[in-house]
């Protein structure tokens, strides 16, 4: 029996990893958890796999033999905006992390900090969370905290988000699912995606990670 999302659809995963033992280990864990898994060992193979349709989840390394995973993330986000994307990489430097998140990754795990249950992490990702290794999360917080102070004066239109939208954005930043946000705020589950689309439009972003990063930069929320 395959694992299914909230709408009952089978959760399909495209796993892009060029190291065969790592790929086998992850594929085995995901298949045992009843996900439908396709694998690719290079950027070219991943692109070919995507021609047959959008996966519900893309799990990708960044350092691939024929290119960089950021290219794949960017292309996948543009072609399949509903696909959840998580990086699984040994690269934890500033350029790699910020590049991946900026182009559309919604999660980022370091290979030396794999969760004990990768299947649960994928389920969290599909449920609306943004799994991020603790060291990466701390790095992002430090980076935003060390940003230069804004010049005096009302240079940012921080009032363009409604109080309700800011509450929802805070819930996203804390990793709550849409259902949890709706429950906390006394909203209908169906109304939350509409609020989030408005938030994306106002902040001129396309993913949860970008929205949180931009909101922290603008001082709309504090982590």
Image (cartoon, helix red, strand yellow):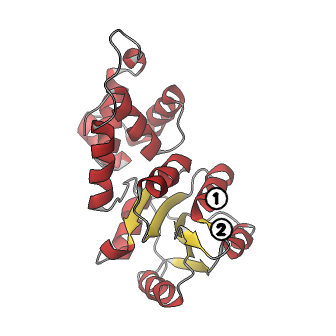
Marks 2 and 1 sit apart, C-alpha to C-alpha, by: 8 Å
Residue 66 visible, this orientation: yes
Q: Which residue is mark 1?
A: 71
In the picture, residue 18 is in which quadrant?
bottom right
Mark number, residue 195: none
Observer-side mark, 2 or 1, equals: 2
Q: Is residue 202 above or below residue 88?
A: above
Q: Which residue is mark 2?
A: 67
Q: Secondary structure at mark 2?
A: strand
* Residue 44 pos. (x, y %): 72, 73
Q: Quadrant of residue 75?
A: bottom right
Q: Position of residue 15 (x, y in %)?
A: 55, 75
Instruction: Verify CB contact (< 8 Å) between mark 2 and mark 1.
Output: yes
Spot occupied by residue 96 in the image (x, y as percentages of width and height): 48, 57
Residue at screen point 43% across, 46% down: 209
- Up the image or down, 102 lies above or below 123; here it is above
Residue at the location (37% across, 10% down)?
154
- Where disc 1 sits, the SS reads helix
Q: Is residue 88 left or right of residue 151?
A: right
- Quadrant where the C terminus sits is top left
Please give left or right for residue 71 compared with residue 52 in the image: left
What is the count of numbered marks? 2
């Amino acid at each position: 029996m395959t694992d299914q999302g909230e709408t009952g659809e089978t959760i399909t995963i495209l796993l892009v990893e060029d190291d065969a033992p790592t790929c086998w280990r992850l594929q085995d864990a995901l298949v045992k958890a009843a996900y439908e898994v396709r694998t690719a060992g290079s950027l070219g193979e991943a692109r070919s796999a995507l021609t047959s349709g959008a996966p519900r989840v893309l799990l990708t390394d960044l350092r691939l033999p024929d290119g960089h995973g950021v290219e794949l993330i960017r292309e996948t986000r543009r072609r399949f905006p509903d696909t959840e994307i998580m990086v699984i990489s040994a690269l934890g430097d500033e350029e790699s992390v910020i590049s991946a998140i900026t182009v559309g990754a919604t999660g980022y795990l370091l290979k030396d900090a794999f969760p004990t249950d990768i299947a649960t992490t994928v389920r969290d990702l599909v449920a609306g969370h943004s799994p991020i290794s603790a060291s990466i999360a701390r790095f992002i917080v430090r980076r935003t905290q060390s940003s230069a102070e804004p010049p005096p004066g009302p240079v940012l239109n921080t009032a363009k988000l409604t109080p309700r939208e800011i509450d929802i954005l805070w819930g996203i930043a804390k990793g709550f699912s849409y259902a949890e946000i709706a429950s906390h705020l006394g909203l209908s589950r169906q109304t939350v995606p509409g609020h989030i689309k408005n938030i994306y439009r106002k902040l001129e972003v396309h993913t949860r990670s970008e929205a949180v990063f931009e909101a922290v930069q603008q001082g709309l929320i504090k982590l």
